[in-house]
Amino acid sequence: MDMDWDFDDEGVQKLTSPGEVITSATQFMRGHGTFVEDNDVVASLSGTIERVNKLVSVRALRTRYHGEVGDLVVGRITEVQAARWKVDVNGHQDALLRLSSVNLPGGVQRRKLESDELEMRKFFEEGDLLVAEVQPTHGDGALNLHTRSLKYGKLRNGQLVTVSPVLIRRRNSHFCSLPCGVDLILGMNGYIWIAKHVAENQKEGEEGFDAEAVYSNKNDDIDMETRAAISRVSNLIHVFARRSIPITDAILAEAYDWAVQQETSPSDLLRADVGDTMVAMVTALA
Amino acid sequence: MAQPLSKAESSYTAAGLLNSQRPDGRSLLDYRPITLATGVAPTANGSARARIGDTDVVVAVKLDMQRMDEEDEEEGRCVCSVECSPSAFPHLDRDALSDLSTDLTDHLRTYLTPLLTSPQLLIIPHARRWQLAVDALVLAHSGNLHDTLFAAARSALWDLRLPRTRGVVYDAPGTGVGGDGSGTGSVERAGVLDHMRGMGRQAVDFELEDGADEGLPLEGRDDLPVCLTMNLLSPVYYLDATSVEEACSPTRLLLFVRPSGTLCGIQKLGSAELHPSELKQALQEGVKHAKEMAGTMNRRLREPTTRSLGSNLGPFS
C-alpha cells in the first residue's frame, strides 16, 4: 500500500477539508473527524490527517481544548458551587475543581472542614485565574482539576493571552522562564500566562505552606521594564498565533531578541509588516 | 459586558494604565489598526464591515418605501437592529446577550435618527419616503465595540445609494398640461411628469429611474459623525480599550464628532461620577482625536475602489 497521502517529503502532515476522500475504508479504520461513505474514509473536519497503524483520524485546526490526564492548564473560575469551583478552560464544558483538590491553609494533609466550605471565596472567587493539572475525567467528559502542588494555584503579577489550543505542544515542563525576566505558563488549553519572573528561592510556600501568599490577590511591585517585557512577549504570542505558528519558549526567546535588536517598540509588533518580517527572520533561524 | 477579571489582573492592568503602559504596549491614545470594507453585502443598498483590532462588525442598510401619516413625522424614519453573535460573547448567556443587543440597538437608533433628516429621503412630500432599515451584526468582540459599530454604520451610510425617483400624476382628460396636450380622453392614462412638476400637482405615485445598484449617494455623507470612546480612569484617559482595559475603566464616554470638529453627542456609560474639570479635558482631547479619525476615514472612503469586491480600505490609524 502506498502511504504517500500521509506525509509529504518534508514530513509535514497533509491537510484535508470536509468531504475530501482520505483513503479506502477496506484498508483503514475511521477515527475521529472522519466518516465512511461508499468504501471511502472521508474527512468531516478541516485539519491534519493523523494515522496510528490502521486508524485514520483528522485533527481539527480550530477546536476547543480536549483534556488529557496530566495536562497543565490555565483556567478562570466561572462559578463557586457547593464544595467545588467551575473553571473555564476553553473546553466544551467547564472543568471542575473540588475543594478537596486544592491545598488549604494549615498543611497539605488537613481534613476539609465545613468552615472551609463556607469561605471558598477566600481561596478562589469568580474571575480568578489559576494553573492546575487535569485529573482523570468524569464519564460525561467534564474535566477534573487539582492544584495539590506548590507549583499550582492562583496567578498574579501578569497578564493572560489566549491562543488556539492546537498551537501549544505537550512538553516536559510548561513552566518556562525567558531570559528577559518573564515567566511563562503555557497552558495546554491555549491560555498562556505571562508574568514577572519570580526567583526559584522566593516562590511562595517553599518552606511550609503560606496560604496568605498563595491565595493573595495583591500584585508585587512591577517596574516599567518588566511591564514592557511582558507586553512585548504578549504581542509576540499574538503575532505567532495569527500565523498559526506553534508557541514554544525557544521561539519566543529568539523573537524577543530579534525585536530588541531591531529596536521595535512592543506596539510596533502589532503592525502586519513588522510581524511578517519578524516571523520570517525567526522561522528562518529555527 | 466583559468577562470578569481576577483582582490581580485588573490591578495589574490599572496600575499599568496609570503609568501610561498598556498591556499591548500601545500609548494611551493609540488605536489598533482599523479596517473598513464597503459593499460587503450585495443585496443591501449600502453595507460595510469594520474591524478595530479583533472586534468585527458588519452593517447593512436596506431602503424601504414607507407611507407617511400625519402623526409619525419623526417615528419610523429608520429601523435599527443590532445582533450580537453568541460566538463573539461566549461567556454571556442568552438573556445577557439580548440585553446587550437591545442596548446597542438603542444607541444606534439615537445616533442615526437625527442624521436622517435629509430631504433626499422624501419621495413624495407628505406621502411617501424612504425608510432605512439598518442591521448590524457583531461577529467578534475584543473591546471597543461602540467605535467599531458606529464606524461600520457610518461607512454603510457612505456606501448607501438612493435610487432617483420621478413623481407620477394622473392626468384627467381636458386638464392636460405641457407635453400631454393630445389628451385622448382615457382616465387611466398616466402622464409622467418630472419630479418638480409632479410636486406642484400633488404626485400620487412614483417610479424609479435607477436600477437596484444605481442611485445617488446620501447628501452630506462626508459630514456624518464618528464615535470615539474615551475610557476614563482618573486621572488618565485612553482610547480604543481592549476587553481587559474596558473592565478597568469605571467610566466611558461616547463622543459623536463630525469631521469639522463639531461635537454632536455625548453618552456616558458606567456609574462612577465624573468631575467637571476632568470632563472638559477629556472632551477637548477626544474631539481632537475624533476629528483626525473622521478626516482619515473620509479620505480612505473617497479613494476610488472596486465596489463589487468589497474593497478593503484599511488598515489605518
Image (cartoon, grey):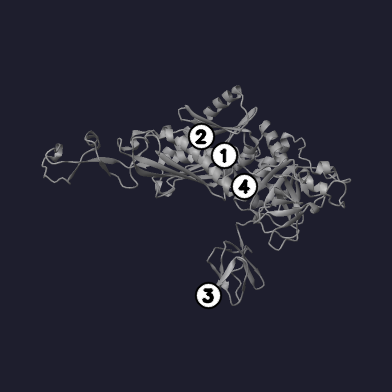
Task: Answer with mark 2 or mark 1, whichever residue precedes in sequence.
Answer: 1
Density class for disc 1 (Cα within 10 Å; few <14, some 14-19, many ≥20) is: many
Mark 4–mark 1 Cα distance, whole angstroms, equals: 20 Å
Question: Element under label 3?
Answer: loop
Q: Residue A239 has which mark?
A: 4
Residue B11, percent from left and from top:
71, 36
Residue A195 visible (yes or no): yes
Q: Residue at x 80, y 53 (%)?
A: A100
Density class for disc 3 (Cα within 10 Å; few <14, some 14-19, many ≥20) is: few
What chain does badge 2 belong to? B
What residue does disc 3 label? A38
Q: Would you say A140 lies left or right of B202 here?
A: right
Mark 2–mark 1 Cα distance, whole angstroms, equals: 10 Å
What residue does disc 2 label? B227
Q: Is residue B168 above or below residue A152?
A: above
Q: How many marks?
A: 4
Q: Residue at x 59, y 77 (%)?
A: A26
> What's under tag 3, amino acid-wise?
Asp
Density class for disc 4 (Cα within 10 Å; few <14, some 14-19, many ≥20) is: many
> What's under tag 4, amino acid-wise?
Val
> What's under tag 1, amino acid-wise?
Asn
Q: Would you say A272 lies left or right of A165 here?
A: left
Question: Element under label 4?
Answer: helix
Q: Do labels 3 and 1 touch, CB within 8 Å?
A: no
